[in-house]
Image (cartoon, rainbow, N blue to C red):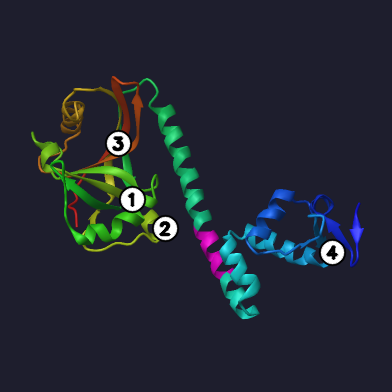
């Protein structure tokens, strides 16, 4: 181990004692976070008392701060300012953790759904559904130009897969149901509240309650007309007593390309037994 005046250590020794790589020390030096002394022979030397500074850098890195933010926190802010930034960063981390936990839970639900649908194209069940918020994006394959929608889209898209691609059928049994409906994004009311998703009067609230839940898992070949499964869905729903004029939501859980010739889609139709209106 090489030492010089003032307990200074060469970069290899110092990095080993501090549990970091020499490359990280050089990177932090370039960013102005630590300042080694360069001897005439070109070697870098680090003082023992720089260890506190380096450990502060590592602590702030694990809070998720950028290098520029670390410089501000270490060089420019008083204690009170640093404490405020740390508190705000923890709030941000907690929100991110909540989101990640919900993404994991959603993935597990989709995995269970795939197992349930193994070998089935359709599956019908009764369900108690919670209210759903629907943000329209297009009608008849044309995007809706509405500033109220534009204000929300970035937040909603960033929350996928908790937010889902969705089609709102105004009358699921109509001959031109696809043309009449709207495509957009949808989320359960509990998820909207938990994630703090912004909502305005462009969002349509679809009531929950006693509902039919029709699961679909189909393979669509390129060149097929849109929604080739819809006649079978309509026949099933009529058999359950669903009346003309009943709205429905079609959630897309997953959509996967299966080579160049086909597309695999997974999702479900949610239809209120009472034909509850959208608000």
Between the C-alphas of marks 3 and 2, the distance is: 23 Å
Which one is earlier in the sequence, the residue at label 4 or at label 2?
4
Between the C-alphas of marks 1 and 4, the distance is: 54 Å
* Residue tagged 3: 268
Which one is earlier in the sequence, the residue at label 1 or at label 3?
1
Q: Secondary structure at mark 2?
A: helix
Which one is earlier in the sequence, the residue at label 1 or at label 2?
1
- Name the spot of residue 42 as percent of width and height, x first: 78, 55
* Residue tagged 4: 48
Between the C-alphas of marks 4 and 2, the distance is: 46 Å
Q: Which residues are magenta?
A: 86-95
Q: Nearer the viewer, mark 1 or mark 4?
A: 4
Residue 268 among magenta residues: no
* Residue tagged 2: 195
* Residue tagged 1: 187
Q: Nearer the viewer, mark 4 or mark 2?
A: 4
Q: Nearer the viewer, residue 243 or 162?
A: 162
Which one is earlier in the sequence, the residue at label 1 or at label 4?
4
Q: How many marks?
A: 4
Q: Quadrant of the C terminus?
A: bottom left
Q: Secondary structure at mark 4?
A: helix
- Name the spot of residue 174 as percent of width and height, x first: 9, 37
């Amino acid at each position: 181990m090489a030492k010089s005046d003032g307990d200074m250590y060469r970069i290899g020794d110092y990095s080993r004692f501090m549990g970091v790589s020499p490359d990280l020390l050089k990177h932090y030096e370039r960013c102005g976070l630590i300042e080694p002394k360069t001897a005439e022979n070109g070697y870098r030397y680090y003082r023992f008392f720089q260890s506190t500074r380096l450990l502060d850098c590592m602590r702030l890195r694990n809070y998720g701060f950028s290098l520029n933010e670390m410089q501000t926190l270490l060089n420019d802010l008083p204690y009170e300012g640093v404490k405020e930034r740390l508190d705000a960063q923890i709030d941000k981390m907690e929100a991110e953790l909540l989101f990640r936990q919900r993404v994991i839970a959603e993935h597990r639900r989709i995995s269970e759904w795939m197992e349930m649908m193994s070998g089935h194209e359709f599956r019908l069940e009764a369900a108690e559904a919670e209210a759903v918020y629907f943000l329209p994006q297009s009608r008849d394959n044309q995007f809706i130009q509405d500033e109220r929608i534009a204000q929300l889209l970035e937040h909603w898209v960033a929350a996928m897969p908790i937010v889902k691609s969705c089609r709102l059928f105004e009358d699921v049994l109509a001959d031109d149901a696809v043309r009449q409906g709207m495509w957009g994004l949808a989320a359960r009311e509990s998820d909207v509240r938990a994630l703090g998703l912004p909502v305005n009067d462009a969002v349509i609230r679809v009531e929950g309650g006693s509902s039919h839940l029709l699961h679909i898992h189909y393979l669509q070949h390129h060149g097929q007309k849109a929604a080739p499964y819809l006649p079978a869905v309509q026949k099933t729903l009529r058999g359950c007593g669903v009346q003309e004029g009943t709205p429905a939501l079609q959630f897309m859980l997953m959509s996967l390309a299966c080579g160049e010739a086909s597309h695999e889609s997974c999702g479900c139709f949610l239809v209120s037994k009472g034909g509850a209106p959208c608000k």
